Image (cartoon, rainbow, N blue to C red):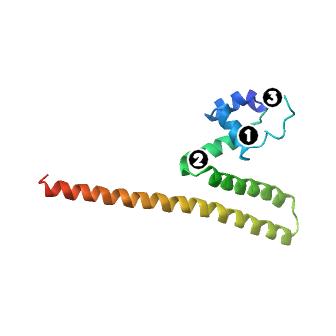
Amino acid sequence: MSATAERPLRIGELAELTGTTPRTIRYYEEIGLLGGATERAQGKHRSYTQADVERVREIVRLRDLLGLSLDQLSKLVEAETARAELRREYQRAQAPDVRSEILEQALGHIATQLELVRGRRRELEQLDAELLEKRRSIQHRLRELGR
């Protein structure tokens, strides 16, 4: 286990480990993407765990990969958090009907995530089509000019 995993991290350390800034971390807390802001006592330093490092890394990865708005990103992360809780519940549950209900709930959260990802993919496909059309138009003009 690394030294950072054994002790609480300060906000600057979290920012450095995740390639963000302390301001970004505080903003993620304010909008509910990351816990911590409401959990600390007044005047106390923020402290974070390795789980927070992983959560911020995932938020950054999704933000960069998908180019989602913060609202969309929040919905995606909320669904992932809910699924993580359902996984824990599933492990504790013994009754097949309870496990079945948990799995049904998980499907709902996955549907939310898929909707967001597919919406973004449609936007990217539309941009791709527009760029292809612009390229064809320019190539056509070049041919008209004998090039």
Q: Nearer the viewer, mark 1 or mark 3?
A: 3
Q: Is residue 58 left or right of residue 51?
A: left
Q: Quadrant of residue 114?
A: bottom right
Q: Is residue 54 left or right of residue 139?
A: right
How packed mark 3 is, by other alpha carbons closer than 10 Å (few <14, some 14-19, many 20 or more), is: few
Q: Quote the CA–CA distance across marks 1 and 3.
A: 15 Å
Residue identified by numbered label 2: 63
- Of residues 66 and 91, the one nearer the viewer is 66
| Amino acid at circle 2 | Arg
Q: Quote the CA–CA distance across marks 1 and 2.
A: 16 Å
Q: Quick one: label 1 or label 2, which is nearer the N terminus?
A: 1
| Amino acid at circle 1 | Asp
Point out which mark residue 52 bears.
1
Q: Could you tell me which residue is drawn at 70 percent across and 32 percent down?
A: 14
Q: Are marks 1 and 3 in contact (CB under 8 Å)?
A: no
| Horizontal and vertical percent position of residue 122 | 49, 62
Q: Could you tell me which residue is drawn at 33 percent across and 58 percent down?
A: 132
Residue identified by numbered label 3: 45
| Horizontal and vertical percent position of residue 13 | 70, 28
| Horizontal and vertical percent position of residue 22 | 68, 31
